[in-house]
Image: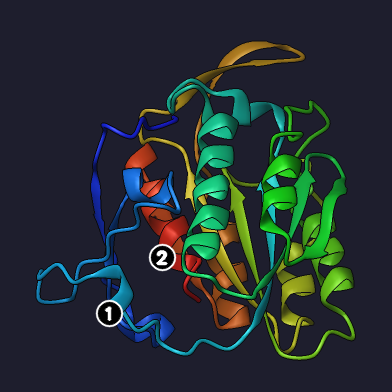
Amino acid sequence: MMLSKDEIVHIDISEIDAYENEIINISNADLLSTDTVKIKSQRKKEIQKDNFKKPIKPLVNIVLLIDTSGSMGASDYKPNRLGAAKEAARMFSKRKVVMNYSDHVAIIGFGGEAHVFHQLDSNLDEVMQSIEKLSITHTGTNIGSAIQSGANLLKNINGKKAMVLLSDGADKFDSSNPERQAQDLNDIKVFTIGIGTTKGGRAKLPHGEQTVFLNEDRLKTIAKVTGGRYIYTPTVMDLQKIYIELADY
């Protein structure tokens, strides 16, 4: 979903304790333009851009792991699960640009195996271009390969490190044991995001069209063992909100 400049939807960032950052509110429309950024204070009072003092935030190296399996073509999000995930990832990157963070971001897409679409990079305009290249694959959902690929990118990197893993859950043929791989990450937190409505969505798979549902179990375990957090996002707006919030991590 691409918002126009006229569609102002205010997003309240409220998880201050989890990320130890100042609470701010910013609209989706504001994210579309670096020229007209409007920041509202925690007390809902608007302040001038020139007077806004951005809290000091340490540089973070963060890898976005995005499921591209066949079930991500499900229609319960518009235009589909993957399309909604890509838009949220773009908003994540746009947020970092607007806030002038110096973070490094990488993009990994995964189905039956993981592919690095963009190495860790502070040029978020190029990162956003790589997000556009993500497309549906029909080779399973190998979460373990995604975690391992993310760990390889973050290996020997100094400073704060994290992964954001978005998926509608592993399929029954995934034997990659991502829970075990997550336990070996040491200083890398993994924030897992579950995408999929309670009613499920119809997706075209190699063996025919069927309804696919969210499988949360592994996503919850991965977040828990790494000291991260599992977040369920039942709507497109919830998905965008959590990505914007995580951009401040």
Position of 219 compared to 196: left or right? right
Q: Secondary structure at mark 1?
A: helix
Residue pictured at 39% horizontal, 82% vertical? 54
Residue pictured at 27% horizontal, 79% vertical? 51
Is residue 176 visible in the rendered image? The answer is no
Say which mark, if any, is on residue 142. Answer: none
What amino acid does circle 1 point to?
Answer: Asn
Position of 194 compared to 62: left or right? left
Q: Could you tell me residue 21's position as x and y percent?
A: 38, 84
Q: Which residue is mark 2?
A: 245
Q: Please, is residue 2 above or below residue 39 in the view?
A: above
> Which residue is more in the foreground, 162 or 10?
10
Is residue 147 visible in the rendered image? The answer is yes
Position of 190 compared to 107: left or right? left
Residue depth check, mark 1 versus mark 2: number of the one nearer the observer: 1
What amino acid does circle 2 point to?
Answer: Glu
> Which residue is more in the foreground, 243 or 46?
46
Crowding at mark 2 (Cα within 10 Å: few <14, some 14-19, many 20+): many
Quadrant of residue 138 in the image?
Answer: top right
Position of 164 compared to 14: left or right? right
Residue pictured at 59% horizontal, 51% vertical? 166
Quadrant of residue 63 in the image?
Answer: bottom right
Q: Could you tell me residue 11's position as x and y percent?
A: 26, 54
Disc with the residue nearer the chain's start (1 vs 2): 1
Q: Could you tell me residue 163's position as x and y percent?
A: 66, 68
Q: CA distance from mark 1 to mark 2?
A: 22 Å
Q: Which residue is mark 1?
A: 51
- Here the colouring is rainbow
Crowding at mark 1 (Cα within 10 Å: few <14, some 14-19, many 20+): few
